[in-house]
Amino acid sequence: MKEFVAACVQIAITPNDVQANVDKGGIWLKRAVEEYDAELVVFPETVTTGYEPGLQAEDLWDLVDEAPGHITLEIQAAAKELGVYVVWPSYRRGEVRGEVYNSAILIGPNGEIVGIYDKTHPAPWERRDGGGWVEVGQRADVFKTDLGDIGMIICYDGDFPELSRLLAVKGAEIIIRASALQRSFDIWYITNAARAYDNHVYVVASNLVGPDASDNYGFGHSMIVNPIAWRLAQARGTEEIIAAKLDPDPMRYITWGSKSLQTFDHLEDRNLELYEQILEEARSRFEPGKRFPRE
């Protein structure tokens, strides 16, 4: 990867008003480039509508669009004009009415879509087979760009070490985590830092701030974490932009400010034979307060 500036745009949305949110996104995208010299700009999860839309899957399908489509075209044009990579997360239509995906859309500086990631771990209430409105994604790709190799995850995906590890094994240098997380700051920080340190990758985590249509409230605190788990930037609980310069040689020393050489490599040092049983089905030995049965 090369040295470049990554930015998180942390904004509040107008619930279920796609055009208003696209317009606002374009304004903040321009700010991130002009004020922070960002070459990669990451927006929060479901930035075109808000996270919990309060709609049936069929009605949400009607509200959004395919990608490319009206959920992306203005942002694609802005990315081309500004010459910047953009991660633009949105619900998007599948092939049939009612088939909706929670997606992160990577747009290149030529305005074209580089790749799309569909959330592979929707929250239990979010999943269509649990009574929600979203289909489960089945791919986790790494996209080669001029900046570096980029993988994407969305919110609850970050709770699953296996997913980020898969992206790292596939060559990711940067993992984008677009989120509308509403749990504690501790969970947010720990999972971001752990996924960065587990896999020796940068984690660029943009979190929504403000309410959605169901009065869930995103608390912001977007952050950028380096491969040795140091926070390079962190937002507050308000609308703002954060940015950091990503160093292409971040593993030279064992910790920030030290001259002690790094000797660990969490990919090379794995004991692969030990992990054969990791794909077996399992449940926590402790019972959650509520389970969402799957159809």
Image (cartoon, rainbow, N blue to C red):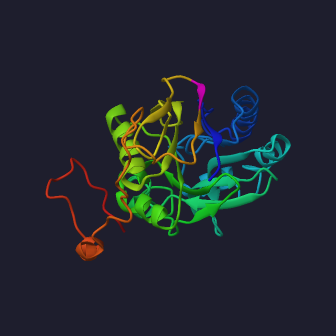
Residue 33 located within the stretch drawn in magenta: no
Q: What x and y, as percent, mark residue 267?
A: 39, 63
Image quarter hosting the C terminus: bottom left
* 37, above or below 93, in the image: above
Residue 241 located within the stretch drawn in magenta: yes
34 or 4, nearer to the observer: 4
Q: How many marks?
A: 0
Q: What x and y, as percent, mark residue 232?
A: 49, 33
The stretch in magenta equals 239-243
Q: What x and y, as percent, mark residue 149?
A: 60, 58
Farthest residue in the left direction?
285
244 or 119, nearer to the observer: 244
Residue found 34% across the figure and 55% down from its top: 264
Q: Would you say 192 lies left or right of 276 here?
A: right
* 239, above or below 266, in the image: above
Is residue 67 at least partly visible in the picture? Answer: no
Q: Would you say 1 lies left or right of 259 here?
A: right
Farthest residue in the right direction?
81
Answer with the quarter of the image where residue 41 lies.
top right
Residue found 37% across the figure and 66% down from its top: 268
* 242, above or below 66, in the image: above
